[in-house]
Amino acid sequence: MMSVKNSVISLAVVAMLGLYGCGGGNGNNQNNTYKNKTKLKGNFNTGTHMSFIEKVFSIFSTPVYAFEINKVAKVIALNHSGSYNIADVNDDGSFEVDLITNDPTVIIFASASNRYLGYLTLSNGIDSIPSHLIKEDTKDIDVGELDTNDTEVAPKHTVNLSDFINADKNEQSRIKSVDDILAIRAKNADMDGNGIVDLLENKNYKLSLFVTYQWNVNANNQVDYTNNNDTKFTNFNILLHTFDKTPPSNIYFTGPSTTGLIDSQNQSSTLHSDGNNHYDSPSINIDIM
């Protein structure tokens, strides 16, 4: 769990996020300009769904943190560049949402009041839709009836990726191993811990790494490219970039014991009135990891 308001960042869960390039923008970039979209379809047939009137009144009801099928009102298709599309869940539990087919995409579910409920995981262990690999003639991807386990939402029947993407078994295995990084975005869609999906309240959070490495230099203090067999990485910092107009002045990083980060306050921060902010973790010595 990641929390900015509670001032804790879990390095073990989110450190790889920046490496995959997730995030970007100000979190308010619903994008409907891409052509050749494919629709993702599915349905929640279990449980009784809210009527229009119930959806309206649910906005003022007690916060819901556990996934309740009858509370699902919105489906968000978020790609790794930060663009997203939103679709409503119909009264019969069915939905269809446009995928942006130039990037891998994760699916997030929310209530009528924008509360985070969960994310889609395919029954074959893949937690994203590899939209960039969708076959050209694919208009719809139907994941069928969905079931839930806490915040995990999965098809009741196996989804055969080969039916709609251009990827052999080796490529599918690679997707399975890599998309865990992107899935972090869906699993932690409420990073500030207030129960609301961040992008639906114009907030965005992104992690990256700043790595320091050691070079040999010559007498003129210039990098000696001919004699750098001893070049090595020495330390790194975790950088948290946020778009949040009410940011905390400080945050605290916690990671595995080998990082030395235990409720460690950021060593520096830059906060801007336009909402673009970043925090640097204390330096982590690579030799101790």
Image (cartoon, grey):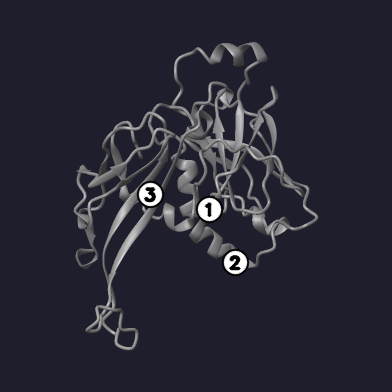
Quarter of the picture holding the N terminus: top left
- Say which residue label 2 marks: 171
Q: Nearer the viewer, residue 30 or 164?
A: 30
Rendering coords of residue 167 (x, y %): 66, 64
As measured in the structure, the alpha-carbon distance from the residue carrying label 2 to the one carrying label 1 is 14 Å
Q: Residue at 62% across / 20% down in the picture?
A: 48
- Tell me whether the residue at label 3 lies in contact with that at label 2, contact meaning CB atoms closer than 8 angstroms: no
Between tags 3 and 1, which lies in front? 3
- Tell me whether the residue at label 3 lies in contact with that at label 1, contact meaning CB atoms closer than 8 angstroms: no
Residue type, mark 3 in image? Val
Between tags 3 and 2, which lies in front? 3
Exactly how many numbered labels are in the figure? Answer: 3
Q: Nearer the viewer, residue 127 or 243?
A: 243
Mark 1, other Cα within 10 Å: few <14 / some 14–19 / many ≥20: some
Q: Residue 125: which numbered mark, if any?
A: 1
Q: Nearer the viewer, residue 198 or 280?
A: 280
Rendering coords of residue 272 (x, y %): 38, 37
Q: Residue at 25% across / 81% down in the picture?
A: 220
Mark 2, other Cα within 10 Å: few <14 / some 14–19 / many ≥20: few
- Say which residue label 3 marks: 14
Q: Element type at marker 3?
A: helix
Choose the circle earlier in sequence order: 3 or 1: 3
As measured in the structure, the alpha-carbon distance from the residue carrying label 3 to the one carrying label 2 is 24 Å
Residue type, mark 2 in image? Glu
Q: Quadrant of residue 77?
A: top right
Rendering coords of residue 121 (x, y %): 55, 46
- As drawn, which residue projects farthest toward the right? 137
